[in-house]
Image: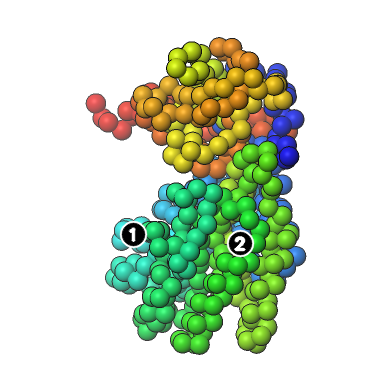
Amino acid sequence: MTKHPLIDLIKNKPLFDTLADQYGTPLYIYSKERLVHNINLLKKALNDYFDSFHICYTIKANSNPHLIKILKTEIPSLGADCASPGEIFAAEKGGINGNECIYTGNYESPNDLKYALEKNAHINLDDITSFHRLKKIGLPKDISFRLNPGFGRGAFSQIVTGGKNSKFGVPHYDIVKAYRLAKESGISKFGIQCMTGSGVLDPDYYPKLIKDILKTVGLLKDELGIHMDYISLGGGYGIPYKDDETPLDFNKVFQNVAKNFHTFFDERNEKKPSLWIEPGKSVVGDAGILLTRITGKKESYKSFIGVDAGMETLMRPALYGAYHRIYKVGAPNAPAIHKVDITGQICENTDRIAVDRKFPDVTEGDLLTVMDTGAYSYTMSHQFCTRPKVAEVLLDGVNPTLIRKRETIEDIFSDCDI
Ligand SMILES: Cc1ncc(COP(=O)(O)O)c(C=O)c1O
């Protein structure tokens, strides 16, 4: 059993009562201490086993520039993994330069490619056709392609991004063709990237994945004489969402990744590329809490607890059936005695934060915390049913700072010019 790392914080009822009064609910709350802890854990593991590495924090996990700035202050060499011009913009707002970013689009528009090129981002192309589009705009100093090795792994089928059913990456049988085209077009510096899915808690997966990527790296060297300046293993490092899940031991993960990496280049007597990673969830996931208030309880064919945060605020349960631990503020260990569905106020029947969940006694007006909502939570939130997006607060110890104002109904219509 792993207790949630922020469980002691949830016991502090006066703190959450004050936050709810001061900033309203629903409210995203982030722990600075946890964020700093997480990024340093990754850095230490890489530092112990690699001479050259680059951490590209994945902006789509959480793009709040205040959080990016904390990470960048902690690790001055930090880069970013960006999937859109907006994410490059957010990275820059957080203090990360364009040339420290890897830009990985898919089915990229000419405008997106132009933006990434102008910002000097390392461009990681999703397909051979992407290269043709890019060439019409201009060519960067270095290029990488996203390899789809033909397999993938993820916590749910929807977040597996490698394999035959994936829309991402260059299939392994076309990879030589892609790099040949880039080389013949005058590119002389190269990287390779591979990201096969998210939420992977199996520590043995990453050493296997690097081994497979290295097969392709060897092939590209033998067939085309291409040396890689960097290899990006992507992200995907899972976090526990349930008490019975075991956190990844990053020291073990990167020790074993390094073993395969160093053996490969030592045996071939070749210069070693830099190892890049693109962590998102593992950096910010468990540092975030969604604070929500119970707005109604209903006994129907099922028992419902209605809260003011629905699928518009936290999309993951409705989108993937994702599980998030939910606690009663002040009493995270209260005995779970009722089976309930926890739902928001959205006019969709998929609007659930939890389904058939054993839950303690609660009443209308009580505050609940939805845990592990630092990643893919605010960034996936939307305004369905014309609900304004919520505020975000950073906790330094128990001291709060508002890092994004709550949207208003007027804000939603401010661009309609009516
Ligand atoms: C290209 C790329 N890199 C990295 C990540 C980060 O994944 P995670 O948050 O699982 O670490 C993603 C997530 O979708 C991604 O698409």
**Residue at 72% over, 55% down:** 249
- Residue 76, position in %: x, y? 65, 57
Position of residue 149 measured from the top left corner of the image (x, y, whole percent): 47, 68
Choose between 36 and 335: the one closer to the eye: 335
Name the amino acid, label 2: Tyr
Badge number at residue 205? 2
Q: Is residue 298 above or below residue 372?
A: above
Q: Give me the C-alpha separation between circle 2 and circle 1.
A: 28 Å
Local SS, label 1: loop
Q: Nearer the viewer, residue 76 or 281?
A: 281
Could you tell me which residue is drawn at 38 percent across and 73 percent down? 139
Q: Is there any visible trace of residue 78 in the rendered image?
A: yes
Which residue is found at the position 44% from the left and 35% from the top?
A: 318
Residue at numbered disc 1: 107
Task: State the image coordinates of residue 17 (x, y, percent, origin top left).
Answer: 65, 18
Q: In the rendered view, would you say 339 is above or below 131?
A: above
Judged left or right of residue 42, residue 155 is: left
